[in-house]
Image (cartoon, grey):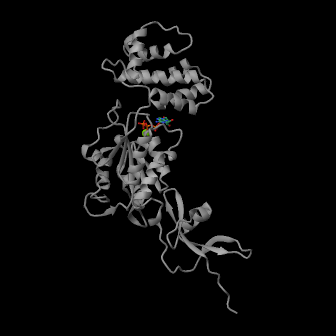
Amino acid sequence: MTKIIKQPINIVKCEWSGNRANAFDTNGVKRTSEITVGARQKAADGGYLLGKFETKNGKFQWRRYEGETSSPVQVSSTVEVPQEHEEILQFIHSSYGLKPKMLMMSELKWKYLVRSGVRGKNIMMTGPAGCGKTMAAKSLVNSLDRPDYYFNLGATQDPRSTLIGNTHFDTKKGTYFSESHFVKAIQTPNSVILLDELSRAHPDAWNILMTVLDYGQRYLRIDESSGSDTIKVADGVTFVATANIGNEYTSTRVMDKALMDRFTIVEMDVLTEGDETELLNIMFPSVDSKVLTSVAKIASLTRSESKSDTARITSGISTRTTVELCGLLYDGFTLEESAEVSIYPQYDNTGGVDSERTFVKQIVQKFCDDGSSDDLFNEDEMATAEEDNS
Ligand SMILES: Nc1ncnc2c1ncn2[C@@H]1O[C@H](COP(=O)(O)OP(=O)(O)OP(=O)(O)O)[C@@H](O)[C@H]1O
Ligand SMILES: [Mg+2]
């Protein structure tokens, strides 16, 4: 008697795409959600196919499939990126719902960001420190159900090994090359690649990225000396970079004009006092709302002061700092104590009563309970600053 080998109803191939092991069937349909994470990951690592089999009791089960497939399994061409114009329009204009509630960003800016992502533009998020550039970039990446990769270029001292790879020597194998994670990322169709802190990257990183980002070139040169070996950037790859541009940070290098030209700029707005208050209230519902309003006011006063012609401070308090400060309030510190540890160290202390720190202290003390500040900073000045700000 010949044994009847059961044929699967469906066959999928599993492949890593960013941090996810996705499953695609022979028609290119994504079946990821039908199969357990563990089964997909093992199949992707083991390089075998999975089949959907009917069990004796009429249920279905995905398990390893050793047989052949009649048609090749399509993998990456079917990631759910809207293709038709109608569909793209619909996606962009309904995308505000994809924005995380905790991220404060205007509807227009968010939609512009999503649109640039869907259209495969190289995106550059700009704005001062701590205004939500990284947060917005990560939120975009999460919203676009596509394979994603993250690289922090501000933290890397060796751009060649991060972006290209390393040459190793092994007594058995001799000299061999191990390619970087970035090489894998650019070869993944439709991936979204986050290049965080590009403005702080080593200039070598900018040079390496120049051809990668150029719409007309789109390749990475592996061996710069010979000018030969290149790797093509796969179709549909989107780059999202962040940069501190035109701000107070001296560690931020001035980015090359040619590199900047390769990006669509999305400028993150510094939050208004109202938005800042709203954010802090959403994040810290158990902290006295009056104190949260004061924090937003303090931040807003420092921001408008730093922009004024007669500025006595070089930068305003960032949203990152107000969030950190409110975390301290939440943990039972007073406004005065919180400001002392989180705000003051950011301002220069030299010059005594004329120092930036003294100036910021004056503002903070206006909002502290005892109200016992000396009037180095008079009511008129406060009023002017508030007017400037509105
Ligand atoms: N627009 C915003 N909406 C919500 N939270 C924000 C916003 N801006 C800043 N924050 C808060 O500040 C933190 C830091 O934000 P983020 O890391 O995105 O700043 P950044 O602009 O990338 O700063 P840097 O220039 O230092 O890299 C966030 O984790 C969040 O708590
Ligand atoms: Mg950042």
Residue that protrudes farthest toward the bottom in the picture: 1
Task: Give how far across and how far down residue 347 sits, in percent.
Answer: 41, 22
Would residue 254 be found to the left or right of residue 148 on screen?
A: left
Task: Give how far across and how far down residue 215 sits, in percent.
Answer: 29, 56
Residue that protrudes farthest toward the right in the picture: 57
Whether residue 23 is situated above or below residue 115 in the rendered picture? below
**Foreground of the two, 348 or 315:** 315
In the image, what residue occupies the spot 53% across and 30% down?
A: 278
In the image, what residue occupies the spot 50% across and 39% down?
A: 103
**Foreground of the two, 390 or 237:** 390
How many discs mark residues in the rendered view? Answer: 0
Task: Give how far across and how far down residue 189 sits, in percent.
Answer: 41, 62
Q: Quadrant of residue 128?
A: top left
Q: Is residue 349 visible?
A: no
In the image, what residue occupies the spot 57% across and 33% down?
A: 283
**Foreground of the two, 104 or 326:** 104
Task: Give how far across and how far down residue 234 sits, in percent.
Answer: 37, 62
**Foreground of the two, 295 or 209:** 295
Residue that protrudes farthest toward the front in the picture: 86
Whether residue 138 is situated above or below residue 20 in the rendered picture? above
Would residue 124 be found to the left or right of residue 258 on screen?
A: right
Q: Quadrant of residue 299?
A: top left
Quarter placement of the N terminus: bottom right
In the image, what residue occupies the spot 54% across and 40% down?
A: 101
Quarter placement of the C terminus: top left
Q: Is residue 285 visible?
A: yes
